[in-house]
Image (tube, rainbow, N blue to C red):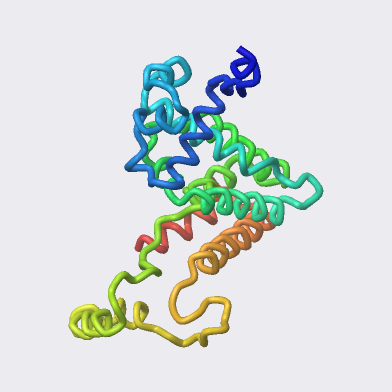
Amino acid sequence: MADRDKAIPRTRLNRDRVLRAAIALADEVGIDSLSMRNLAQRLDVVPMALYKHVANKDELLDGMVDVLVAEIGPPDSGLDWKPAVRGRILAARRALQRHVWAARVIEARPAPTPAVRAYLDSMIGMFRAGGLSIDLTHHVMHALGSRVLGFTQELFDSSPSLDPQTQSAALQDMSSTYPHIVAIASRADHDEQSVVGPGCDDQFEFEFALDLLLDGFERLWRQGWSSTDPAHNAKAAAIER
């Protein structure tokens, strides 16, 4: 009886504990290997116990996304809109980099989760507080796309899986048909100690594109740009011709 009284009580199962355990498990085994069964094993409960807190696998994934988005944190209210937006997006990127599966899950959800909606609403509010019009902010959000959540689909794979000799031979075979792609893929104009390195550095490329976009947004804002401006429409018509 005395030994039983000294036993450490089992931590009570709740939704937050389920979601955080699921995130930890996905970090370890990958999102494709995450199941309700192995999550129950991780928590030392029967699988049915999980369904008191998440109705199904989809609700589990939605909840995991919301926990991750909460890791991003609030914007820095002491900064002007452009550095504040930049810092928030890079904070989002750091959060997603801690969980390499997260971007794919966010993309695959049929609709934004409540936390994602709140995050996007907050980002829009940052642009509006900086003085950008509803019209410009609308186009800004389209231009940023998934980058506003800290990830983007890359055109070039910066982590080649082939050994250097095989990769070189493959590029040689492609060179006559796709010379410009090969020129980009095989470039090595940076030394090993540079920020970018010999090839693509995902973080550098992400920040490079983000800064280009933010600088462009700021220029349009200072110009008082509007999509309904006749001058803008005339330029668009000239480009189409």
Mark count: 0
Q: Position of residue 135 (x, y in %)?
A: 57, 42
Give the quadrant of residue 40: top left
Image quadrant containing the N terminus: top right
Image quadrant containing the C terminus: bottom left
Query: In this rendering, would 152 be left or right of 166?
Result: right
Give the quadrant of residue 214: bottom right
Residue at image coords 38%, 69%: 159
Residue 201 showing in the rendered view: yes
Query: In this rendering, would 202 be left or right of 167?
Result: right
In the image, 128 versus 151, the foreground residue is 151
Residue at image coords 78%, 44%: 77
In the image, 118 versus 239, the foreground residue is 118
Q: Residue furthest right?
A: 78
Vertical placement of residue 161 versus 143, above or below: below
Vertical placement of residue 199 versus 69, above or below: below
Residue 227 showing in the rendered view: no
Q: Position of residue 44 (x, y in %)?
A: 45, 27
Residue at image coords 53%, 76%: 196
Q: Position of residue 201 (x, y in %)?
A: 49, 71
Q: Position of residue 180 (x, y in %)?
A: 31, 80
Residue at image coords 43%, 78%: 199
Q: Residue furthest top?
A: 1
